Image: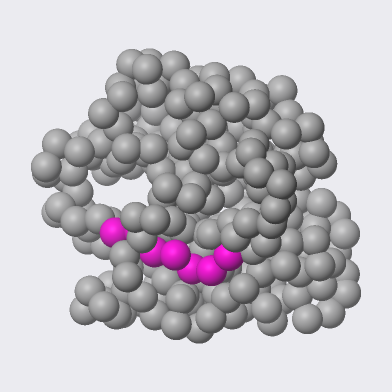
Amino acid sequence: MITEWYLLDTGFCAVKERIAYGTGNGIAPCHAVCGLLHHDARGWLLFDTGYAPRVMEATRFLPYRLYRSVTPFHLREIDTAMRQIARYGLTPDNIETVIVSHFHADHIGGLLDCGAAHFVASRTAFEAIQGRTGLDALRRAFLPPLLPADFAARTTWSEDLHSGEILPGLGATRDLFGDGSCLLVDLPGHARGQIGLIARTVKSESLFFAADATYSARAIRENIPFHPATRFFTDDSRAARATLQALRKYHHACPETLLLPTHCPEVFARCSR
């Protein structure tokens, strides 16, 4: 089971409030938060890696510089996941597993800094970006320089894991460690093959790392629809809307589960400092 967990803020980009969160007329910081969890038998794992200075390096020149222009980001070396884990007495070599929700740059920025960690990702998500470069990669918010050359060789595909529980609204899951503590769920729409994580702790908490299936927990609770402009950076808008409704059904059935979308302001407010 999960014995400890922390939220790490790795930096932010500037977004229009109404487009990302459904309310407001200004510009808001959209923080990229990743999860650090300890499993009593499998050691330390990360859910995504967030931003890292490598994102700045990868976007120095065209065409990848366009990513920086469209989503201006603000990040510091001290905010990287690999620097932050030091406060818990950890080094990159202590990270045994990294779950990659999807391959957008603000979720894989620190993959190259994760030592010899084993990766878990969706084969569907990987195949959607594999071999893509230039504008073809940018259309999927993917920056090829951020992906380790041996990524596939170090990865367990979520589709190959044993089946887990059937959850209300969400349906079938995949059991990462075979003990019910870490269930991977499909969250299609925002990105091809996107996955989330439901983690159970020794304190009987349930944590739902929902990646970018929505940009706020409030959208799930209040059924706030996606802004029409999001279709320009969404893989499948119809699937994204269906996933939001699946999240609502799960929340109504399991209201005690803590909702943790990556870019949610409520999640940022909980981040370890």
Q: Quadrant of the C terminus?
A: bottom left
- Residue 202: image quadrant is top left
- Residue that appears at 60% across and 60% down: 29
Residue placed farthest to the front in the image? 25
Residue 216 rendering spot, x and y as whole percentages: 52, 40
Q: Is residue 9 left or right of residue 224?
A: left
Q: Is residue 65 left or right of residue 31?
A: right
Can the viewer see residue 116?
A: yes
Give the overall secondary structure of the magenta segment.
Answer: strand
* Figure check: 108 above or below 84: above
Residue 162 rendering spot, x and y as whole percentages: 35, 32
Q: Which residues are magenta?
A: 6-12
Residue placed farthest to the left in the image? 203
Q: Is residue 78 left or right of residue 243?
A: left
- Residue that appears at 26% across and 78% down: 87
Q: How many marks?
A: 0
Residue 51 rendering spot, x and y as whole percentages: 56, 68
Q: Quadrant of the N terminus?
A: top left
- Residue that appears at 71% across and 76% down: 58
Can the viewer see residue 42?
A: no
* Figure check: 227 above or below 148: above
Residue 9 rendering spot, x and y as whole percentages: 44, 65
- Residue that appears at 31% across and 24% down: 255
Q: Nearer the viewer, residue 2 or 252?
A: 252
Q: Is residue 207 left or right of residue 160?
A: left
- Residue 103: image quadrant is bottom right
